[in-house]
Every structure is written in C-alpha cells, then in structure tokens.
Amino acid sequence: MSDITPNPDDSTERSTLDMTRRTFLATSSIALLPGLSECGSAAPTSVTPSMSPGDIPLEEYIENPELIEENQESGHVPTVPYPSVRSALAHDRANKSPLQRWQQSPYFESLNGNWNFHWALNPANAPSELDTVGSWDTTTVPSVWQADGFGHSMYRNITLDLSPYDPPSVPSDINPVGTYQRTFTVPDRWMDDRRTFLRFDGVKSAYFVWINGDYVGFDKGSMTAAEFDVTAALQSGENEIGVQVFRWSDGSYLENQDMWHFAGIFRDVSLYSTPNAHLRDYFLRPSLDDNYENGTLHVDAEVANYADSAGTYKLRTHLFDPNYRRVKTTSTTIDVPAGDSVGVSFSIDVASPSKWSAEHPNLYRVGFELRQLRSRSSTEAQLAKFGFREYEILDGQIHVNGEPVDFKGVNHHEHHPELGRTMTEEMRREELERLKQFNINALRNSHYPRGPEFYEFADELGFYVCDEVNVETHQNPELVNDYPAFHAQFMDRFARMVQQWKNQASIFMWSTGNEAGLGPAHFDMAEYVEGTDLDSDGDAGKGVDPTRFLYHQANNGGVAPYADVIGPRYISPSDLVDIADDEDEQRPAVMGEYNHAMGNSLGLVERFWEEIEEHDQLQGGFIWDWVNQRLDEKHTTTPDATEYGNDGVFHGKPTVIDARGGSAVELSGLDDWVELYRDPSLDVTESGLTLEIEVQPRQPWTGSDAFLTKGDTQYGLKMSDESTLQFFVYDPDEEWITAESTVPDGWYGNWHHVAGVHTGSELRLYVDGTQLASTPHDGSINHNPRPVNIGRNADKHRANWEGWLSNARYRRAAIHDRGLSANELGSSDPGSSAVLWLDFETFETDGTFRSYGVDPFCCNGLVDADRVPRPELWQLKKAHQPVRLRGADLAAGLVEVTNRYNFTNLSALETQWQLRAGGDTLQQGSLDIELEPNDTTTVEIPFDQPELEPGADYWLVVSFHLAENTWYADAGHEIAFEQFELPFDVPTPALEQISEMPDISVNN
C-alpha cells in the first residue's frame, strides 16, 4: 500500500519527448533528456571475458588514455532505494549523513571496514590470484593505504609524483599495487527480479574489480564515483570481492595538483539493490518566476527496465517542504520496453516556496515512488533534496534569487593530518562549522569533486560551491593540446562530475579545470553543459545544464572565452580594480586564488574587500587556501655517536632492514630520507673535510642518489647521473668544485664504502678504499643554511623536483671536520674529528612530528590540519563580516550601519555596544536594529560622556551577535564588530619631573 495519499488536485503530465533505448552493460553512453546520464565522450564499454589479476594486459589499461573504464554504469545521481517514501523520510530526519541514512535501507550494504590487503612495490610482485589471502595484512576501507603504514606519501606542487614524465607511460619497476579482498553477505531478497550495483566513491588511481573470481570491470576516474552492475556475479549468502589498485596510470597525468599524493580506496564502498524497474537517474531543476516569488520544479527522470518483458509503470512524485510537510503529489505513466530505459519530463508549481541561499539553506524533499501500473504498493522509493534558487548573471553581476551576491570563499582541499585524503564525518562537520563561524560562504573544490557527504552538507548548511573537474596538468599545461588521446578522459571526468552532482543546490558554477591550459577538451566540456557551439566546430554539445555558470582556472589569469565568470589569480587590489575599469571585460569577476595564506599573510585582505564592495563587477574570490596540509608522522631517530648529538630523523618511511651482520636503512626513492637538523658542527667551511657513506645503490635509477649532502651549495657525495659518482664542495668564489668518476663494475646491488676527502689542497673521491678521482682546490667552502640529508638534497629535492629521491640502502654515515688519509677511511671508530657518526644500529620512535614532505610549500592555510584557526583567519572574518559600520558623528553617538546580508534583516542579530577606556568597560547596552538587506541607516548609541581621565583613550565598540543557537554556533557568537576612537577633549596628563622620580640602583 502507498504510504502517501494524493491531494485531489494532483496533476499528471506525460512527457512529449521521444523514448530512448539502451542495452544494459553494453554501453556507457545514453542519450536521454538533457541533463540525464550522458557521459558521451568516454570510450565504449565492452564486456570482457573473465580474467584474473595475473591475466591483465596492463599496458592496454593503465597506459592507454582512450580506455577510461570497462563495464561501468554511466554517471548518475545517487539512487539508493527504500521500501517506501515514509521510511526514507523517517531515516532522513534521524540521520545526518547520506551513509547513515542509506544504511537504514534494507537494499543497501556498506562494504567499509576491514579488508585483507597485500601491498607490492610494483605489478610484478602483486598477487596474480585472489585466493592467497591467508598471508596478507589487513587495512581499513575507506583509507589511503599510506595511513595504514603501506607505501609512501609524496608531496608535489607543479610536478607529478611519478617519474619519468612521459605521457601516457607509467613506471613498471616502481608502481605500487594494493590488492584488497573481503567477503560480504547478499540477502536472499536481493536475488529475485532485482539488480545489484557496486559503487566506489573514490579510488586512487586505477583499479580492477572481481566478484567471486569473475572479472567485473575497470576504472581510472580516481576522484569521481564509479558503479558496476554485479548482478550476474553474485550468489545468495557469502560472496567475495577483490580489488586491485595501481598507484599510477595514464590518468595520473591529469592529477598534477598541489597536494599530498596518496593511493588506495579512500572513499566509501557500497552495494545497493534495485528492482528490475528502477528510477536510475533524475535531474531536479528548480526555477523562480520573474519576481522571485513563486517556483517551479522541473523534473527529468529516467526509468530503466532490466526485465525480459516490457512494463508500464507509474512514477509518483511527492514534494515536501523544509519542515517535511507534503506540498504536492504528481503522477506520470511510463511504458518501458524490456532491457531499455525511458526519459520523462514533468513540472510541479509551488506558490511562495521557501528559497535556498547560503544565508537560509531551505531544502525541499522529493519522494519518488515507482509502481506497476495497477499496483497500490511501491516497487521502490527514493528520496532527494533540492532548493528553490535561481542563479543568474544580470547587468554583469552574479545574482542569487534576484540579489547580487559576494562570494566570500576559500579553496578547499580534503586533507586529514592522520588519514590523508580520507575525511571523517566528524571532521567534515567541524570544518564546515568553522567556515561558517568565520563568515565564509563559498567553497571552491580545489581541484577535484568530492564524495556525497560534502555536497549534502554544503546544501544543508549553506555554502555556494564551485565544483571543479579532476583535471590539472601543471607540469605541462599544454598536455591538452599535445596529447589529443587524453581528450575523452578530460570529457569523461567532467561529464561524470556534472551528472553525479547536478541536483545540488549549493553548486553555482562548474569549473573546467585548474592549471591545465586551454584546449579543445575544455571547449567541449563547456559545450556539454551550455549546448552552444563555442569553438565553431559544428558541434554544439549536449547542453545538459545551462542553469549554472562556467569557470576556468588556467594559468592565464583565470579566463576562457566560454567562461561566464572570470577568475583572476594572485593579483593585487589595484589590478583587480583595473578589471572593473576595463570596458572590454563585462563578465563578473570572482578571484580563483588570491592572498596566499602562508605564514604571516593576508595583509591586503581588507583592501581587497574595500574594492570588491566599491565595484559591482567584483564579487569576491577564494583565498588560497583553507587547510594547512601537514601530516602527523612517527618521530623516529637514530643516534649520533659524536659529542654533538646530530641524531638522524626519519622522514617519509625509511625501512630498517638486516644487512651485513647489523642493521641498515632502506630508502625507496619515494620521498624517504634521513635528516640531520642544522647544527654549527656540520657547517664545515674551512679546507679539511671528509664525508663517508656505506651504501648499496639499487636499480631502478630514480633520477637522484644524493647520498650525503648539505644542500647543493656546501658539500656532498652524490650520483650526478646513473653512471657517475661525484664529491663536491661549493666555493663562494669558484662555485662547484667536483671530483667525479664513472661508477666501478658491480656498482648496483652491492655494498660499497664511498668517501669524499678535502685535504686542504685537493678533493679526492674513493670507492672501497680506491681513489677514483681528484681535483685541486685550496679555497674555502660556502655556508648553506640547508640541513644535512642522507638520501636527499635539501636544495634541489623540493616541491617542483621532477623525479624521485634515493633508491638505496645505507649502513653508515660520517662527517669529519678534517681530511682523513686513505688508511683512516672506513674505520669502525668515529675518532676525535667526527662531527657526525651514524651506524644505523639503534632506533627510537617517540610520538609524532608535523611533516610537510619534501617542501613546506604545503604549509599554508587559514586553519591548521586539525582545523584550529590560525591568526590570519580572524582577519579574514573581519574583512568578510556582513555588517559595515562607519562613524557618522561619533561625538553625538551617531554610527552609520550597512547591512551587507542579501536575505537577512539585521533584526536577526543582537546588537551590543560598549564604551571602553583601555581594557575597562565603562558603559554598555544593546540596540534593536531593523534593517533590510543591502540597506543603510544611522543609529544613535546612547552613551554618556564619562568623567575624562587625563591621557586616557576612549573607544566605542559596536558588535553583532547571533540571537539564537544555530547548527554552527551558539547564541552570542560574534558575527561582526567595529571600534571607534571617540573624539573627546581628553585633558593632557601632567608631566612627571625627573627630579621627583625615585633613584635607580643597579646590582651586578
């Protein structure tokens, strides 16, 4: 039985559009109504014969940019079914997150939790079968595998974390592979006349899936969800799933973001079961009338029929207001042939709906019921949320519901100090609370789409979101033009993002990429949503979502011919004003990245906002960036045997191994090294120096073996290329002085003692006691402030290093402040001249430290990684505050107040004032201010002039506070304030005579 009784005035409207057919599991493309699941530029899906992990022809999958996925469902909104609309509404009321809500459905199963796990450095060492899990480790899903102690986290800015850069090839000797396996139970009720879909919300970077040994499919979308129809592979009761994840694929060349790079199943994994007749996609398009008073919900829906026979179905749509009161119900009858799907459109008019904005995020619910034509019970029910809001550009300004809005935004990364890319629900909510508390109303998803929780919370809590495709090619911005084989992959990522999140009220703008140049793929993305032939190639695109704006963030000033909104980057306030003064540029300007929040930053933020508020065309921007990307790593040290205590500190994930009757440290090449913090004892600048290292170099060559260096301009032992060993010092007058030699036979894979000696008159290079090279030098050695590193050059190996670090094992490291003789080299005793002596025999792990990887350039953000505000966030809050105050006649207590809210009367806030002298409050009170949005008035502050103390400063402080508790802060939370020095005629204090001061006595 239906749990909803329709109103007598319910309307029914049949779609007049043509039906469109598809064969399920045979194509990833479907041409339905505009806005439905069409990811049309992807390579066609094929049904591949079953293969085990060992059978995969890897180069055809992970080095082939034209093969994007296999056997994957086309992109669509989340469609988890419930038994009834009533139950869906009940779970929506009781549960905060999508995952919590979906878990209450009998047709949903989360696969999060513990999985068996095998990590391998490369594909050759990965499991070829999935039946050997007894010897495997375990890991948690969702998580990046680095958070569970497997593999290596790597921070890069402009360059990729893979090496060498050679699209579309990826390394084979070092390309970590994570293989996952677990069992799960399928209820009997899922097996009859139903389909079951497996969903991955995010897997980095490319992966293959098996169910009960049967190959299911492949995906390399990374940051966008993927679904597979696994019905044919399932059995009632216990089942087994296997997933093999490759850290790098050709898709990695599109993931060149300035961030830590991780790998693994880092977002949720789930199963859901649908009836054979299933509402598989829908586009909810709200609009408002010309007066922004009444609304219409336009619905495009796709109903699929997986059965062997045709069916006629009734789609009942129930609309509920923000308080869960039913507004209307409408019904549409749909004939769906067997194995096909049909698109249908209808609309629902609503008088005076509660409108959605970031200030008042009112959300309506839509309950869908799908029934057999003459049945009174639901085949399935689904619940979706949307907001009545209208995004427009009028007179060169972005308007929301008819009002011009400023975007007080930040660039937002997903980052957790312990979990890496995986975000807990608790941290996500805490983060959004913090954003709201500090007057931030807009988020740019830099530089990839998010999982379901983010979008639901942004809709519910009220943020304007710029959603950005997972495409950045910063190392080569011309990749979009140089490698046309990637075109389909650009398009697929964009289309899937749009299709999955097209119903979110918060998204006002689609970004076609960050720092990825400008080429045909970007124009095709724009045409995909606009439906206009923007590049005059004869193809106008699909036009799936012209309701939102287009944005582009190339390193060309943040502009593109098709962009509705320009996004200037890292410009000054005066340059921003020049845009407003440019008669040839009439588009709204919302800065894509500005006021880099690193260190003592944001000094110009007030000036920026003065200009934004002065010029209509300037509508805010996104600070770079929100969160400091530190990682909390284990603090492991190995002691120095000298009196100087230059203990070595592990960075990354060095591994302690057994070697040569003792211990050694193994460095992988993937950002592992040992660091000696700066100490004067290591600043050897006079002639006379010895460096010793006991090392086992390994293949593959990773582009660098900096064995023992103090930056690039003091001293070091290193390999300058794959076959050349070098000892260098840097002379302030003569620059680099080197002694170098071709490596001896048997160099790789064997242990060697390597030494560089500066005798005072020459540099000598030794390997295993034999002098290989010498160079005269009697000058001084430069001082470099970089720390001594083993396995890394602290000058060169930073955020933009094109390559990896040392792939070698280390047994001993020593530095002497004199030149040793040949006979003294290799001693087992440090002697009196050693300023460093590490034998790698003892290690101690004590707590954690804050790691920034190879470069502290990721050390920026308005909040620390644990979301504790940094000082500059308070300055941003002040610049963003929605109430402006100006002294009108301060002596008379007159203050001009401007309400810069767009939809909120100031009566919603409590206004307080204080008269202060120094830190003392002399008088205080409250005011009742009724002021409409974007209006200005003058108010009188009823203070009395106090008895004036000579030399005192008197200040009037006016502040605005929440009058009631909200989801993000309690009543009393300060929203805005201003202080004014009062122009009182304060008496001048009498000068104190020196002769009247007490005597001063000084004791040694």
Image: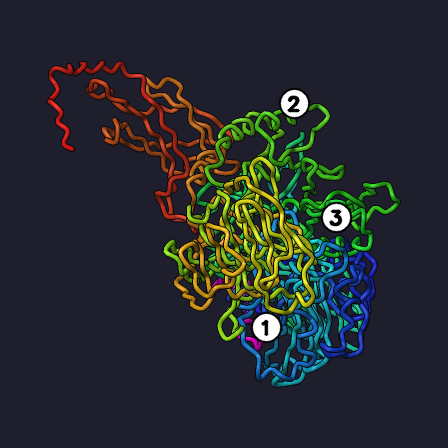
Give the secondary structure at mark 2. helix
- Residue where numbered disc 3 is placed: 529
The residue at which mark 2 appears reads as 581
Q: Residue 709: x and y, percent? A: 55, 51
Name the residue carrying label 1.
108
Q: Residues within 10 Å of mark 1 (few under 14, many from 20)?
A: many
Assess disc 2: are there few (<14), some (14-19) or many (≥20) residues with their C-alpha within 10 Å of its C-alpha.
few
Q: Amino acid at mark 2?
A: Asp
**Which mark's residue is nearer the viewer, 2 or 1?**
2
Q: Which mark is residue 886?
A: none
Region in magenta: 92-117
Q: Residue 312 falls in which quadrant of the image?
A: bottom right
Dividing the picture into quadrants, the one containing residue 1 is bottom right
323 on left or right of 536: left
Q: CA distance from mark 2 to mark 3?
A: 30 Å
Q: Secondary structure at mark 1?
A: strand
Identify the mark nearer the N-term, 2 or 3: 3
